[in-house]
Amino acid sequence: MIRVMLCDDHALVRRGIRDTLADAVDVTVTADVGSYAELREALRTQPCDVLLLDLSMPGRGGLEVLATLKETDVTIRVLVVSMYPEDQYAIRCLRAGAFGYINKAGDPAELVAAVRTVASGRKYLTPEVAQMLAESVAKPVAESPHSTLSERELQTLLKIASGRRLSDIAEELMLSPKTVSVYRSRVMEKLGLSNNAELTVYAIRNGLV
Amino acid sequence: MTLQRAGRPFELKRVETLEALLQALDEHSFDVLIADYNLAGFTALDAWNAIGTSQRDTPPFVVLSGAIGEAAAVNAIRRGISDYLLKDDIAKLPHVIARAIDFRSAQRAREQADRELAVSERRLAELTEHLQQSIEQERAAISREIHDDIGGSLAAVKFDLAWIVRHAENEEMQRHAQAGVDMLRHAMDASQRIMMNLRPPVLEQGIGAAIQWLADNFTRRTATPVRILAPAERIALPPTVELAAYRTAQEALTNIIKHAPESTEVRIELTDGEGVLTLEIADNGAGLPAQMLDKPRAFGLRGLQERARTVGGWMDVSARPGGGTSIILSVPLDPASAAAATEGEAP
């Protein structure tokens, strides 16, 4: 018997989920609660294998609740049931330790399948989520190490090194002098230099100009 | 004597030192100051500078001189004194005074107009900011209401109808219930889309995640790849700045679809180095024609520029025909970098 707990601030949604799960003979709902506070209370007194959790309840911080649960109740498998489309939240919930993500707009029959899947210790992925997960694995996380110069910063460095004044650079790059001055201070910060002369020397030594 | 002959009523107050001059200015209001160029221990220009730096509202200042050189006269006028008169031409004094007074009052009117303009511009900026914030708060509230009230109810009804579909014994009832479920799913998709447009939930995960999401959607629609450069760690921003950055990225990508569909790559850079948030969205399309930059309204850029201003930042649009277009939002994140940014040409 899979023991399920529901946490959603909408009483009618909880009842709907309850009725949906009631059709499955191997599933029983041990508690349904309307807030994170009640959830903590219920978890102390009731057994729970699978928790159906709405992440966007008043008081917010659904993801933090997820993270806390992961630390305190290792055995509980959390299935996130949300009004938000998968593409905005699902991957993040999985990263935060959820075992599955279901959009409330989906087919209710999915609920039973999802509960059974995560109860057996496997992740439940809808085709949409699986697709996104595959994409996120294939795509390297975009990042620029702070040590390397961005294209714009390099442009700025080269122009300073070739003796242009800030206002000339601004004109050539069609940027405001303020923006160029931001780039300039980033270049100096990244290269550990403190004035235009040092920038010029650096550029020459490194064969940039 | 000359003034008496001119037949204008006047009062004369005579001072001999700088201190006395400044004190007299504080105690009375004068229509005109007349000073000899070479005074005891100081020149008329010293007096003028002293008045200028003391932030007083200055009456017209006429220098009377025995022999002021051309250069000194030009220099004096350049410094803002009203007029000068050689002592030989003393007869012209009434005329010079009248002219100086007229000129000064016109100048005062202009200064007053400038001050009023500055005040009204500041009010306008404050109003814009207030409106912008109200709009966003309103949107967030509506989104929240849709989520809590409509969304929840629709979901609940859908569960009930789906239950009827599963338990109905007669086929017709099942068919009707199923039609209801399908319709509800449609309504829920619509409310999700509306909530999305009001305030994308992805923003809760930070600007980096939100921009990544915008870029993914852009690529899905256009098949144009987007290269994102951003720090791996989450950039923490004030909510208003976050929203301004999000809307800027959104608008810039929309512009690319509309005005530079020939782009084969889009580059987005996000960084908060040196206390300034910089967000750049660049395409490699044909570039905005120069005259289009003067019509920012056509590109929704005007609104973005206003928005940048309300969060204390600014926006650059740099484009070259054939060289792509790049939109850069810069927002100082702390007072120090805000001050540094306004310095312009640093040493």
Image: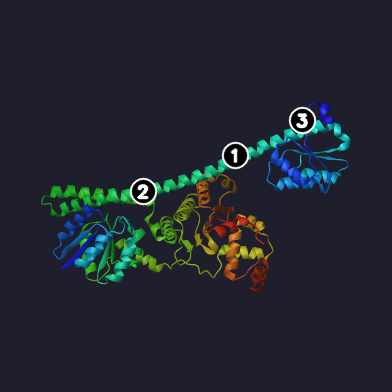
Judged by depth in the image, the label closer to the viewer, 1 or 3, is 3
Find residue B5 and report its horizontal and vertical position in percent.
84, 27
Q: Which quarter shows the C terminus of chain B?
A: bottom right
Find residue B25 and report its horizontal and vertical position in percent.
72, 41
- Disc 1 secondary structure class: helix
Q: Residues within 10 Å of mark 3 (few under 14, many from 20)?
A: few
Find residue A61 and report its horizontal and vertical position in percent.
34, 60
Quadrant location of residue A155? bottom right
Residue at the (33%, 52%) spot, across then down: B192
Q: Which chain is mark 3 on?
A: B
Name the residue furthest bottom.
Answer: A205
Amino acid at pointer 3:
Phe
Quadrant location of residue A25? bottom left
Q: Which quarter shows the N terminus of chain B?
A: top right
Q: Nearer the viewer, residue B119 or B54?
A: B54
The residue tagged 3 is: B10
Q: Is residue B194 visible?
A: no
- Disc 2 secondary structure class: helix
Amino acid at pointer 1:
Glu
Judged by depth in the image, the label closer to the viewer, 2 or 1, is 1
Q: Are marks 1 and 3 on the same chain?
A: yes
The residue tagged 1 is: B116
Q: Residues within 10 Å of mark 1 (few under 14, many from 20)?
A: few
Q: Earlier in the sequence, mark 2 or mark 1?
A: 1
* Distance between the alpha carbons at the discs numbered 2 and 3: 68 Å
* Distance between the alpha carbons at the discs numbered 1 and 3: 32 Å
Q: Are marks 2 and 3 on the same chain?
A: yes
Q: Nearer the viewer, residue A7 or B155?
A: A7
**Residue B141: assigned label:** 2
